[in-house]
Image (cartoon, grey):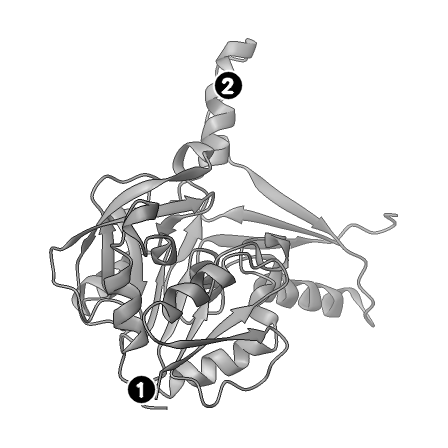
Amino acid sequence: MSRRIGVVMFPGSNCEYDAAQGVESLGATAEFVWHSATSLSGFDGVILPGGFAHGDYLRPGALARFSPVMEAVAAFAREGGPVLGICNGFQVLTEAGLLPGALQKNRGLTFLCQPTTLVVVSTKSALTSEAKVGDELVVPINHFSGAYTCDDDTYKQLLDNDQIVLRYVVNPNGSRDDIAGVANEQGNVVGLMPHPERAMSRLLGSEDGRVLLSSFVHANVTV
Amino acid sequence: MVVDVNLRSGIADPEGATIERALPALGFVGVTNVRAGKSFYLDVEAPNEMAAVDKAQALAERLLSNPVIEDARVRVVTGAS
């Protein structure tokens, strides 16, 4: 049976179709979940896609974290279910406290839309289990608030627990320690600013996102 | 009431830095440490001032600021609006 991936739609999400198409190209089934949903049972994984949830008012992710679905996402994550936040979805997960740290405005206040080269730092996450440490992946970014930041204690914890999942080879946005993606301590919740769902086909520039979404689609489920 | 939200000290402020860099070109010299923030203006119903401050402080911490990177300060402004 194919894996069922829930793709959460907030008012203002705009990468949900790319995410759904990405996982379906890997043989999974994608189903959209409206942000007012209160249950995620039956899913093998949940994606919070990119976009501008609730208009990004106040701060990106600040209002989305109070959407009813976020309690279900937290429960799903607590039980070990794989959760992936891409771009705005990453911002939502940090605001919700499901991932450590925060995303700040880019250094230089520049909106960035360009390919980046990422290096796989840890394979102990739902997003990177099928990759190898040191793999370089070309994946585009498309954001204004993507500079990862955290306090020193959190940073030490990230290093000690191998929670830094991906780094930029060339830092585009001022992220602390070139961080592009982080996981929670258990590795089942992962967030990244780059868009793997837009790097699924060589025809469109890169297919390096496939190993990431494939890892996620096949991540072990304990829910 | 007014809730001021500012980046915590030590957190880089690209907006403040950009403003600061623009100042010399406009003839403003000797202006440093520019930090950008936000202010929210609210009317709060409460039995007394302390309760109103508590309420504003709670919502400032829960929603208006991200405690990971920002500090929120509540000021009482009476007779406004």
Horizontal placement of A93 versus B62: left or right? left
Give me the disc on residue A62.
Answer: none
Residue found 32% across the figure and 53% down from its top:
A199
Q: Quadrant of the C terminus of chain A?
A: bottom left
Q: Quadrant of the N terminus of chain A?
A: bottom left
Horizontal placement of A162 versus A94: left or right? left
Q: Between A61 and A87, which is closer to the camera in this rendering?
A: A87
Q: Secondary structure at mark 1?
A: loop
Circle 1 chain: A
Give the image location of residue A117, x and y in percent.
23, 45
Name the amino acid type tagged 1.
Val
Name the amino acid type tagged 2.
Ala
Above or below, comparing residue B68 to residue A185 in the picture: above
Residue B67 visible within the image: no
Q: Name the residue tied to disc 1.
A: A221
Q: Between A126 and B28, which is closer to the camera in this rendering?
A: A126
Give the image location of residue A37, x and y in percent.
60, 81
Asked which quadrant contains residue B62, the reply is bottom right
Asked which quadrant contains residue A152, the reply is bottom left
Q: Name the residue tied to disc 2.
A: B22
**Whole-Å distance between the Cαs marked 2 and 1?**
52 Å
Q: Between A76 and A47, which is closer to the camera in this rendering?
A: A47
Residue found 59% across the figure and 66% down from its top:
A10
Single out the mark in the foreground, 2 or 1: 1
Asked which quadrant contains residue A11, the reply is bottom right
What crowding class fits label 2: few (fewer than 14 Cα within 10 Å), some (14-19), or many (20 or more)?
few
Circle 2 chain: B
